[in-house]
Image: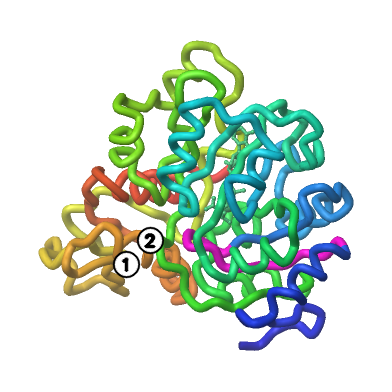
Amino acid sequence: MMLDPTTILLTAEDAQTAAQTLHRGGLVAFPTETVYGLGADASNADAVARLYAAKGRPSFNPLIAHVADLNAARTIARFDDVALRLAEAFWPGPLTLVLPKAENCPVCDLATAGLDSVALRVPAHPIAQSMLRAFGGAVVAPSANRSGHVSPTTAAHVAADLSGRIDAIVDGGPVIVGVESTIVGCLGSPVLLRPGGVPREAIERVLGRALIAAATVADAGHAPVAPGMLASHYAPHANVRLGATRIEQGEALLAFGSDLPPGSEAAVAVRNLSPRGDLAEAAAHLFGALRELDAAGVRAIAVMPIPTHGLGEAINDRLRRAAAPRP
Ligand code: TXA
Ligand code: MG
């Protein structure tokens, strides 16, 4: 992989180097099981400011703090019974909890956009785990892409977006889950703020009740629910058309399953998220397929209907954002 000389490439053995770079205020991209994150010391406002600049991200959009385990998490936020039950069921793993800040919360105000709440996650990826343990504190990490691009699922995706703008990339190969963590707000009744790597059904089984949808809370006039959930996001350069049951001239096909729609033979390019119709496989391939179709220079992508249960909720959410009108 070609890297700008100012961005160094690390491997799984370099957890100490990654942690030292973070301690010096540096920016380190690292693999999590969901997508690659761009890490900075959560307590260092200068480092966090450089992180927003490297991504080109609006700084009103708060970040997720990553820690190695629940004990570390409890120094950052307050857990009620429901939050504790979710943390015990799904951590380490692709679940983020939005919780009230603990007293003396070390996460700087810039990283939480001045909110009284903080988003927290304990990633399961072994490289993320060893880096967080070597570092000792909280690491804020948005997805390691330029703001508005699709999230990176390989180190090469990170390099394509951020090479020369960050200090290091830890290469851990392709990620397993492929869509970002599920975000649940636990500031009252639990609210689904973003569908993601833990299916809603699994969370509802643990809670023994339905999660409130973020939109319902927003409608009820409550505080902003997920400030980062801009309508257009995860956007490829091509136009994206959803629910396609036939392929028009000049379109590329993003397929799911083996039963391709009429017109597929003439598609300018085809990527199949999962020929056997498996939603977990489709999630793992989603962002890479969008990047490949972009790299191939296609101008329009027709996406077959994808089931909405399980990981399908997150996949459809990301595709709706990819298809939304651009600002
Ligand atoms: O899987 C993931 O979650 C990845 C990996 C790297 O951990 N990270 C990620 O971060 O997706 P990011 O920055 O792309 O998305 C964070 C989301 C944003 O939509 C943001 O608005 C929301 O979390 N968020 C952060 N703090 C919040 C808070 N206090 N209240 C509500 N939403 C919050
Ligand atoms: Mg992101």
Question: Label 2 near label 1: C-beta < 8 Å?
Answer: yes
Residue nearer the viewer, 219 or 250: 219
The residue lying toward the viewer, choosing from 163 and 192, is 192
Instruction: Give the amino acid type for the residue marked by disc 1 in the picture.
Output: Ala
Q: Is residue 18 above or below residue 60?
A: below
Label 1 vs 2, first from the N-terminus: 1
Residue 128 placement, left or right of 218: right
* Quadrant that contains the N terminus: bottom right
Instruction: Tell me: residue 134, above or below residue 83.
Output: below
Q: How far across and down, in percent of the image, does residue 92 sit?
A: 49, 53
The x and y percentages for residue 74 are 65, 39
State which quadrant residue 280 falls in.
Answer: bottom left
Q: Is residue 19 left or right of residue 215?
A: right
Above or below residue 14? Residue 198 is: above
In the picture, which quadrant includes the C terminus?
top right
Give amino acid for label 2.
Ala
Residue found at the very far top of the displayed protein: 220
Which disc is residue 300 wearing?
Answer: 2
Reading the image, the residue beneath label 1 is 252
